[in-house]
Image (cartoon, grey):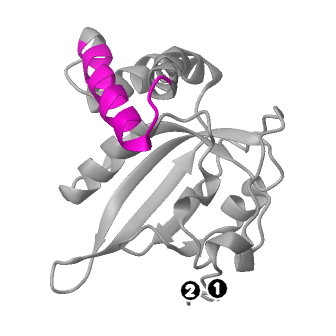
Amino acid sequence: MLDTHPRTAPRAARTAVRPTGEERTFAADELIVSKTDPRGVITYANDVFLRVGAYSLDEVIGQPHNLIRHPDMPRAVFALLWETLTARRELFAYIQNLAADGASYWVLAHVTPSYGADGAVVGYHSNRRRPSRRAVERVRPLYERLLAEERRHPSARAAVAASSGLFQRLVAEQAASYEELVWSVIGEEED
């Protein structure tokens, strides 16, 4: 049984991981699974999460889930993720993650709130599967435009605000919502 008690290390104890440019993947029949508390602190990670992410269980339990955030992922996607989860809804999203050794890996994430017996949100559950190469190539230009917009702004807050607005406009050109855009990519590219 996996120990799910947080062992939060000070943030300063973590060293920044730099992307190496190496890209890794995982088998089509594997799922990366993690759970967090309501603040996004990891309480569970399965063996696929650990293997693909090049982490040990002790290195991830008690750490913020953004431990695996790749710097090439637009903040606007995560703003949408948290907005959706706060509204107690699930979200599907294409996400590029960063492993402990600097390798990157793409996932099609399905993130849902987890509820306690009283109906309160007690955390979040995420399962990720391997996306098709065509799906990644379809979303990458959108993410690159969002990143370029974010880099034009001096603060994280201004960057998120600007790229979130651009995100809404770019998505509206292709679909009624990001969710519909993702489902259209899944339908067209994941078969």
Q: Which mark is residue 121?
A: none
Q: Is residue 38 visible?
A: yes
**Label 2 environment density (alpha carbons within 10 Å; few <14, some 14–19, many ≥20):** some
What is the x, y in percent for residue 121? Answer: 25, 74
Instruction: Tell me if residue 167 is in the magenta stretch.
Output: yes
Mark 1 crowdedness (10 Å alpha carbons): few <14, some 14-19, many ≥20: few
Can you identify the residue that label 1 sits on? 2
- Badge 2 marks a residue whose secondary structure is loop
Position of residue 55 in the picture relative to residue 158 (left or right): right
Q: Position of residue 2 (x, y in %)?
A: 64, 85
Q: Which mark is residue 6?
A: 2
Image quadrant of residue 104? top right
Q: Residue at x 48, y 46 (%)?
A: 109
In this rendering, position of residue 133 left or right of residue 66: right
Frontmost residue, 11 versus 2: 11
* 12 over 136 or under it: above or below: below
Q: Main secondary structure of the magenta part?
A: helix
Classify residue 12 by image quadrant. Answer: bottom right
In the image, what residue type sits under mark 1? Leu
Q: Are marks 2 and 1 in contact (CB under 8 Å)?
A: no
Please name which of the two marks, 2 or 1, marks the residue nearer to the observer: 2
Instruction: From this view, report whether residue 98 is shown above or below residue 41.
Output: above
Q: Is residue 160 above or below residue 133?
A: below
Stretch of the chain drawn in magenta: 152-172
Alpha carbon distance from label 2 to label 1: 12 Å
Q: Residue at x 78, y 45 (%)?
A: 18
Q: Is-magenta flag for residue 51?
A: no
Give, as a three-letter code, the residue at label 2. Pro
Tell me residue 93's x, y (percent).
43, 38
In the rendered image, the quadrant that contains the N terminus is bottom right
The picture quadrant where one finds residue 92 is top left
Most extreme residue toward the top is: 173
